Image (cartoon, rainbow, N blue to C red):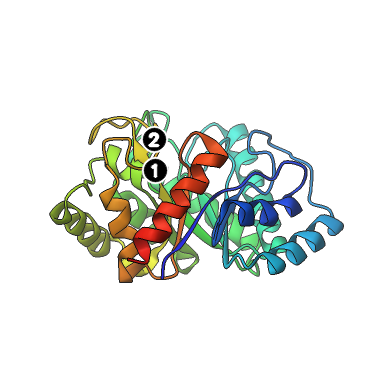
Amino acid sequence: MSLVGCHVSVSGGVEKAPERAVEFGCETMQIFTANQRQWTPKPITDEQAKLYKENLEKSGIKTVVSHNSYLTNLGGFEEEKVQKSIKQFEDELIRCDRLGIQYLVFHPGSHLGKGVDFCLHKIAENIDLVLQKLDNVNVTLLLENTAGQGTNVGFDFDHLRKIMDYSENSNKFGVCFDTCHGFQAGYDIRTKDAYDKTFKKFDDTIGLDLLKTFHFNDAKFDLGMHKDRHHNLGYGFIGLEPFQWLVQDDRFENVPMILETPNGDEKWVEELDMLKKSRNK
């Protein structure tokens, strides 16, 4: 059975997230372990880590996903920013490991005019530098597919495959498939035929065994427009039916399916309820 959940606020402390997730009706959740818009956020205290683990155990939440900072660009070329990105990524992995978080989702990076292959190599190289220091950290790195806006890489399945292949730590990787991003990059899932073709392409290029998490988002713009604008399920250009197929797809049993749709708390409760009912039909 698939696991459904949403991105949960850590306002007031990371230890408060599991209880919030339960209130939404989550079976899985995604969090930021720290302020995603600061290079050096406050560290998690011993007491916070202890309370978080206790509250998580009480919650029954099965899998937790952390989303990395939006500031990080491991594929850039400006040395100061690259070093800050490496340090931020290292700190995030340490926080995830300390909290027992299984998956870290991150946007691959942007080439900023240097070209796609330069960027893919640079991402793999910088991740390897981090993992050389943190070889005992038990966190799977999930490359998130992108919409392809600006100079972002990762909108083509082949980009994600190449980052893994270029890395000396390919066994540490998996993928987070964002439905809006994939749709904006040209991967259609609106008909059963298109859905089957997209996931066959993913399987042929990357392997479905490496698809570890979904971000569930409808899209405010039509197919292939490279605009990263999320919409509520069934209100955008993707429509509701593909999300029903996803929660019913036996290939994605126990795979976290995380809502990142707009309009917040009340809407997430409604969408999670709808997904559960669709799954259990």
Q: Position of residue 89 (x, y in %)?
A: 61, 48
| Residue nearest the observer in this picture, 80 or 198 | 198
Q: Position of residue 61 (x, y in %)?
A: 60, 64
Q: List the residue tagged with mark 2.
A: 231
Q: List the residue tagged with mark 1.
A: 217
- Asked if disc 2 and disc 1 are in contact, CB closer than 8 Å, the reply is yes
Using the rendered image of the protein, determine whether residue 83 is visible from the camera's viewpoint.
yes
Q: Quadrant of residue 78?
A: top right
At 42% from the left and 66% from the top, the residue drawn is 2
In the rendered image, which quarter contains the C terminus?
bottom left
Residue 122 relative to residue 160: left or right: right
Q: Position of residue 23 (x, y in %)?
A: 63, 53
Q: Quadrant of residue 207?
A: bottom left
What secondary structure is marked by label 2?
A: strand
Using the rendered image of the protein, determine whether residue 168 is visible from the camera's viewpoint.
no
At 73% from the left and 39% from the top, the residue drawn is 40
Which of pointers 2 and 1 lies earlier in the amino acid sequence? 1
Q: As shown in the figure, which amino acid type bears the numbered disc 1?
A: Asn
Residue 213 relative to residue 94: left or right: left
At 32% from the left and 71% from the top, the residue drawn is 250
